[in-house]
Image: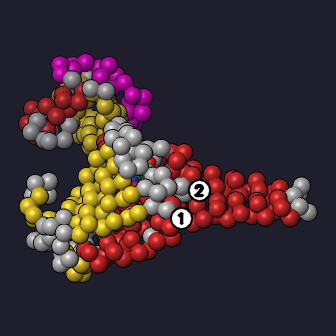
Amino acid sequence: MSLSLLKSTLGPMPAPCVLIDKDDRIAFMNSAAEKILGEAHVTKHYITVLRQPFILDAIENAFAVEDASEDVFEERFTTTKNDQDYHYMVRCHKVAQTYVLLTFEDISEQQRVEQIRRDFVANVSHELKTPLTAMLGFLETLQGPAQDDPTVRARFLEIMSIEAERMNRLVSDLLSLNRVEATERIKPKETVNLSTLLASVVRNLAPIIERKKCHVDILDADQEINIIADSDQLQQVFSNLIENAIKYGEAGNKIEVTLNAPKYLDSIRKEGVEISIKDNGPGISFQHIPRLTERFYRADSHRSRCQGGTGLGLAIVKHILNRHLGRLKIESVLGQGSVFTVLLPTLRD
Ligand SMILES: Nc1ncnc2c1ncn2[C@@H]1O[C@H](COP(=O)(O)OP(=O)(O)O)[C@@H](O)[C@H]1O
Ligand SMILES: [Mg+2]
C-alpha cells in the first residue's frame, strides 16, 4: 500500500492515527492526532513527539515483528491540556510492510470511573476501619487490665456497642445505596399519597424527636396529592431529610415540613409538588452545599460522626430522586438554618 493511499484512508478517520516510517520518522498524522499531539510533526523522529518510554517500546516491538504478523502492541498514553489529563490506549501495529501505525482510543472517562471506584473502596475501608480499630482496642483492654473491673467493663461494652451500631448503619447504608443504584432505571409504579407517607415518616422518627425534645410540624396544603412512586424509597428520602433536620439542630428545635399544592415547576419543566423541610439548626456554609450529595461528604465531619452519621444519606436521597425524575434543592445560610426541598413530578410521561 502506498503512502498516499494510507494518508487518504487515515485522514478522515475520527480516531487519532499516526504513521511512522522505517527511518523512525513521522510519515503522517491525521487531524484528530494533531489535536492531541500538536501540529507540524511530520518528518520528525517519533521520540521527539511521543516521549513516554512504554510507547517507544511498543513502537520498537511493532517494527520488530514479521511482516505478515497481526501482532498489536498496546500501551497507555497521557497528555495534559489546560491542566487536565487525558488518557489514551495506543495500539501499535505494522502496516504495509514498512510502516507502524498508532491509533489512539480516548479512555479518560474509563479512567475517571476507575478512580471513583478506587476512592470509594478507600473511603469504605477507612470508615469501617475506624470503629473496628476502636473495638479491637477495647477488647484488648477487656481481656487484660480491665478484666476484673465491672465498672470499666460495663462502660467499655457500651462504647463497643455504639461502635458496632455505627458499623451496622454503614453497612446498611451501603447496601441501600447499592439497591437504589440497581433500580435507578426502573420506573416506579405504586400510587403514593404524600400526606400519609409524611405522617408515617414522622411517626417512625418519634423516638429521636422525643430524645431531642424538638417539634416537627407537617403543613399540609392538600390531603389528596397522589403520585406514582416507590413508597419505601420515598420514605427513605423524607426520613433522612427530617432526621438530618432533627439531629444537626439543637434540642428543642422547630422543624417544618411543608407539602405544597401541585403546580408547574420550572426546574423540572412539568407539573410537580414541592415538599420542603425547614429547620432552624446550625445551617451549612455555601461552599459545602454543592457537594453534600457526594458519598461520604460531611459539612461538619465531627458533628456528623458524633451523631452517628455515615455521610451516605444524601447520596441515597439523590439517587432515589433521580429515579423519580425529581430534584433536591438545598438552601442554607450558616447560623440561620436550612431548607431542603424535594421536587417530584406529579404525572409520569
Ligand atoms: N439539616 C441540616 N443541617 C445542617 N447540616 C446538615 C443538614 N443536613 C445535612 N447536613 C450536613 O450534610 C452532611 C451529609 O448528610 P447525610 O448525607 O445525610 O449524611 P449523615 O450520615 O452525616 O447524616 C451531614 O454530615 C451534615 O454535615
Ligand atoms: Mg443523614
Does 161 sit left or right of 303 as displayed?
right
Does 341 sit left or right of 142 as displayed?
left
Q: Position of residue 296 (x, y in %)?
A: 46, 51
Q: Is mark 2 on a helix, strand or loop?
A: helix
**Residue 111 in view:** no
What's the residue at 59%, 62% (across, down)?
A: 167
The disc at residue 211 is: 1
- Quarter where residue 302 is shown: top right
Q: Which amino acid does label 1 sit on?
A: Arg
Q: Which amino acid does label 2 sit on?
A: Leu
Nearer mark to the viewer, of 2 and 1: 1
Q: What stretch is highlighted in magenta?
A: 39-62
Q: Is mark 1 on a helix, strand or loop?
A: helix
- The single residue placed furthest to the bottom in the displayed view is 190
- The quadrant the N terminus occupies is top left
Which color scheme did the rendering employ for the protein? secondary structure
Q: Where is residue 310 in the image (x, y as percent from the top left)?
A: 50, 56
Residue at the spot of label 2: 128
Q: Please tell me how crowded label 2 is: few (under 14), some (14-19), or many (20+) other residues with Cα within 10 Å.
A: some
